[in-house]
Image (tube, rainbow, N blue to C red):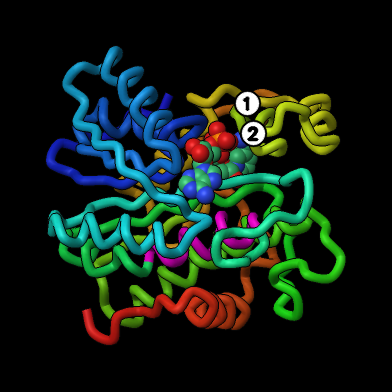
Amino acid sequence: MYNVPDQTGKYAVVTGANSGTGKETTRRLAAAGARVVMAVRTVAKGEAARAEILAQHPGALLDVRRVDLADLESVREFADGLIADGVPLDLLVNNAGVMVPPERMTTADGFELQFGSNFLGPFALTVRLLPLLLKAPAPRVATMSSGVATRGKINFDDLNWERRYRPAAAYAQSKLADLMMGRHLATIAAERGWPLLSTIAHPGYTRTNLQTAGPSLGREKPSPAARLLVRVPLPSQGVEQGAEPLLVAAVSAEAKPREYYGPSEWFGLVGPAKLAKTPRSALDDEVAARLWTTAEQLTGVRLPAVV
Ligand SMILES: NC(=O)c1ccc[n+]([C@@H]2O[C@H](COP(=O)([O-])OP(=O)(O)OC[C@H]3O[C@@H](n4cnc5c(N)ncnc54)[C@H](O)[C@@H]3O)[C@@H](O)[C@H]2O)c1
């Protein structure tokens, strides 16, 4: 188990902190002394997760706040709330995500659900929180991608899948976009001389709500995709293990800009987090820069001129 270094005095935001790798990341950061804002879509679920963590770690410093990443107005409200508080932010963990909805669905702003929730929402959140991150001495952003980013392609002609909807391909695109966002943020930080460290992770195949309830998105009857996914006989791991690459990306003192962490695997046995191979599709910096500009245009959220 990765030993999270002392986080006393650190202030962190974890999105999707009520379940899966987000809850585990929150638990481990808080157990190491960080004060964590649990950024959740449903406050009651966030409070239940907070109570669960507090039962294990009574001294944990946890605040539950609402953010719906599928609604850019909600992202703005959440970020404005933190900025109004003015507490320098040491760490943003872009963890939340949805996978393979039963049909083409859209966000409050009309984007395809996965592109909007997994990429555009976290993009807007990250850019809006930059002024607060840059108030901290050594700020970090860790973003959760996925092993399926390897199969992703950024389809600039139809980013929102208005032609032929392929939910799994849309998921892969959104997670490739996360990986490229994390890499491009590191480029921007280097260009501007910011002390901000941006890293990326993928969890490996992990038993969470994503594989079961996730694809059905709260429907009573699981979608065919959900039924298929739970039957796939892939070796999977528990959430303690699945959160490790993200934790390493978020807090390891050895991590460097643009590094991508994943689980080590050996004949189906999952070991400690290690550097993962960045898929070729994510290496094109021109595509990453174009994606960043496109996200600025689509969300209306732009890099601050001077920070
Ligand atoms: N579990 C896996 O095998 C696996 C594999 C690759 C990548 N991932 C990634 O790991 C991350 C965490 O997923 P998980 O496996 O813990 O699944 P999960 O379903 O347990 O957790 C996802 C979290 O994201 C939150 N979320 C979803 N849409 C949101 C929105 N619009 N606004 C705010 N929060 C929202 C959910 O409420 C939940 O808390 C995701 O980014 C996912 O794409 C998971």
The answer to whether the residue bearing label 1 lies less than 8 angstroms from the nearest atom of ligand 1 is yes
Q: Nearest the camera: 161 or 4?
A: 161
Q: Residue at x 46, y 65 (%)?
A: 123
Displayed-image quarter of ligand 1: top right
- What residue is pinned by disc 1? 207
**What amino acid is at disc 2?**
Gly
Q: Residue at x 59, y 28 (%)?
A: 208
Where does residue 126 sit, x and y in percent of width and height? 38, 63
The range drawn in magenta is 113-126
**What amino acid is at disc 1?**
Arg
Residue projecting furthest to the top: 55
Q: Secondary structure at mark 1?
A: loop
Q: Residue at x 58, y 82 (%)?
A: 290
- What residue is pinned by disc 2? 218
Mark nearer the N terminus (1 vs 2): 1
Of badges 1 and 2, nearer the viewer stands: 2
Q: Nearest the camera: 145 or 103?
A: 103
Q: Which mark is residue 47?
A: none
Where does residue 252 sit, x and y in percent of width and height? 34, 44
Distance from the alpha carbon under mark 1 to that under mark 2 = 17 Å
Q: Nearest the camera: 7 or 126?
A: 126
Where does residue 47 sit, x and y in percent of width and height? 34, 27
